[in-house]
Structures are given as C-alpha cells and as structure tokens.
Image (cartoon, rainbow, N blue to C red):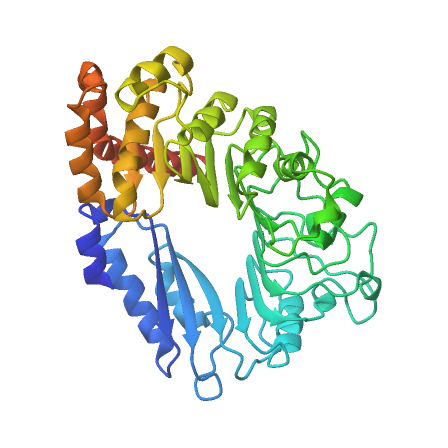
Amino acid sequence: MVRSIKILFSLPEELEEAAGNVIASPDIESNIAKFVQRIRLIAPMMKKTTISVVSLDFNRYPFPAQPSNDLIAQLSQYAIDIDYGFYFWPVAIDQQLGGLRSLEYCSNDPTDGGEQTVQLARRNASTLQLLKIDVHGSVDITGLVQNDDGGYVQYPCLLTFKLYGLQSLDARRLPVFPGAVPFPNLRRLDIGYENPFGDDTVFRDNATTLEYLSLNTSPVTARILREYRVFTPVSHPNLQQVSIGVKSDFELNTFDTDVDHMRFILSIGATAPVRVIRDPLTGPGFQSVIPVFGEHACIQVLKLDNIRLSLWDVIALVKALPLLSDLHTSFSGIGQRPRGVVKHKLPAYVIANYAPAGKRLRCWQFPPAPTDDVKHAVRCVLLLALVCPNFDYAAIHTNSELFMAYMKEMITTDGFRPHASRLRRLLFGGWRNEIRNVRAVLAAEKAARASRGW
C-alpha cells in the first residue's frame, strides 16, 4: 500500500488524508500502527487516516470497536485521527459492539443477520457516520428508528445513509412519529429500490444538510414525496446532485401524462445543478418532455441513462438549459434530416437555424457505440460544435481511436472544411477536459481545507 501511494502521488509530502483496509488478525493493532507510521514518513502533512477493519471470520478474529489506549498512545505523537470502521459479512454479529462510525451490511438472505444488524445500528446510533444496508427481500427496519420502549432513535452524526434492495413493508405496520427527526444531519441519502418507511421519516429536517440524493420513483416513494410535500422549489438549497431512477414496473396511472411524470422527477431537488435520470422515458415520449427541462434552467450537468437522442433532441436540450456544461447520453444519429437539405449542407443549415445555442456546453459523453455508428456519432459531434461556441470535448467510451480518425478525416470534407480551424479544437479537447477536472479537484480540496481551518 505504501509503495502504491509513492507511485500514484508525485508529491506525497502534500498528502493530507489516507485510507486503508486492515484484515482482522491477532496482531491487528500492531499492523495499524505500522501502517500509520509508514504513511507519516512519506507524507508528513498527513492530518487524517481512515482505517477500516475487515473480518472474514469474526468468530476466530474478533476485534474491539475502538482502538485500545495503548494504540492511541502510540499514535498520539502523529496527531492523526483514526476512524475505526467495521465491515462484515453476515456470519457472527456481536450486537454489543459500541462506538462504531461505519456499518455496512449486505446479504441475499434477509434472515441471515438482518435483525442483528438493525439492533447493532441502533446501539451505535450516537456515533455512526455511515450506514449501508443492502438486502434483497423484505426486512422490517422499524428498529432503526424505534426503541424497545416505543420511543424513537436519533442518529445525530449520520452523514451517509444507503438502503438498497429493501422492499417496502405495508405502511400500516410502521409506526409514524410526527415529531421525530431520526436523521437530522444527512448529507447523502441513497434509496436503491424504494422507500422502506411508510412515511417521510428519512427526509425530516435534513433539507438544509442534504447534498446528494439518489432514489427511485416507485409508486410507494412517489406517493410519500407528494403526500408529505417533501420537495418544494426552495426546500433543499444545498443539494448538489440528484439521481432519479424510473422503475420499469412504474404504475402508468400514477401520472396522467409523460409531461406530468417528468415534471415530478425534476421537482425532486429542483435547484440541484447535477441531475442523473436513469431509465427515463424513451422514444417519442421523451421528445414531448424536453420543454419541461426549461423549467429547471439551473441544471449544469445532465446524465440520461439508457436513452438514445438524436442530434435535434440534443440541440433542443441545450437550448432549454442555458447553463448546461456537461451532457451524458446515448445518441441515435442525426435523426430526420430537414427536407431538401443534403448531407454536405448540414453544417451551414445548423449554423443558420440554431447557432448560437448552449453557450456553456463543453462536453458530450456517450456510451460505447457499434463500429458502424461511430462515423454518425462524429458527424453529430461536429454539427453540435458548430452550434455551441464553447463545445470542445466529446468522449466515446470505446472505439476512441476510430472516433478520432473519423473526426480528423471529416473535418477536411465539404461542408465542415470552412470551419476546420474551429473544429480542430475537438482533437485536443480531452487534454483540456483533464486539466479542468484537476483544477476542480484542487479547488474543492482548497475549499475543504479552508472550511476545516487548515
């Protein structure tokens, strides 16, 4: 691990955070101490080290929930904080463990450790910062928010809460605490299947702290969000990214029209600049909802999974979203060519009818395309570049060499040749995009250090 850090970072002395996994063993604390000491030698500016303890056989190698006083004494000279995590498979769960900061449970059989996990989480409610439960089946997780005496449990330190695979129970079986606030400081909430609570329990009083949200608009979740008015146009001011999945078995009568459905999807975290929509409406249905995006002009990054858009759909999107800088979607070719416009006249046509549009669009990324479609993709990219003045980077995740070869060739053909100097920027857009990404990461790190007073 130390060697890999030396390889990955050319200036290790500037590193301030590190993380690593340590396998549970009889000399686990000695291994932790050695790990931190070596990290400190190559990165003297280290402020924090996160240690996650992994136990493949808890019965054979149990370990304490917190570092011993001896280990703390050894590490005190380094001024390093230790996050003593606990990740386990459902083999033997010690419900008496206390002081945990992270707890992750994953199982295909909800009867194998599910109830014990809920009890363990509740016991550590005051210290948990990350809680992940991934169970394929119905699990009553009422115990997460309810004490044995009927009172509610609060997780004041919980920042990340992930629930995957859970099927919602009958809402009438779940208690409702109108005044309870179990998760007041959540920053990230992932609900991978549907909301397992029968009400707005998981959304209460964290509207100002939530920064990342991922959920599916199942009928149950949609009903809860609408009934409890969880999201309003100004309710979640700090949300940065919202990822919404549209379930394939979504009840068609939940919304009257496709437009109503998309308007509901976009109303979830309405001010979030980054939007991911998974498995959205396809075909003609999507064209009808493009104008709805214009009601959320704050969107800067848009990712549409499993949908193929034509060039004209993409142009319509960027015209509706003036702040859009990054677009991630599949493409279906140019689409229906305007009547009377031959192929080599398309560059002049799009300039005359659509430019300028999408003045902030810089990047269009799309998934792998068959070899036969690569040339069509290149043509669409070049036409989009003529419409969007700052567009300079297109990424296809396979066939990249063929993609660039076609681009070099097509730039010199009739129609595109008069704009060759402008279009050649696309040949080097990848480098500029990497530089932008590095600058963004450095700026984020600088802001984070400033917020911590470093």
The residue located at (29%, 24%) in the rendering is 343
The residue located at (20%, 32%) in the rendering is 407
The residue located at (68%, 56%) in the rendering is 195
Q: Could one spot residue 221 in this view of the protein?
A: yes
Labels in figure, total? 0
Vertical comparison of 438 with 140: above or below: above
60 horizontally vs 413: left or right: right
* Image x and y of residue 320, in percent: 52, 23
Give 117 or 297, whichever is nearer the viewer.
297
The C terminus lies in which quarter of the figure? top left
Q: Residue furthest toward the bottom?
A: 60
Q: Residue furthest toward the top?
A: 352
The residue located at (21%, 52%) in the rendering is 8
Q: Could one spot residue 454 in this view of the protein?
A: no
431 horizontally vs 127: left or right: left
Vertical comparison of 148 with 281: above or below: below
The N terminus lies in which quarter of the figure? bottom left
Give 284 or 251, whichever is nearer the viewer.
284
Q: Quadrant of residue 427?
A: top left
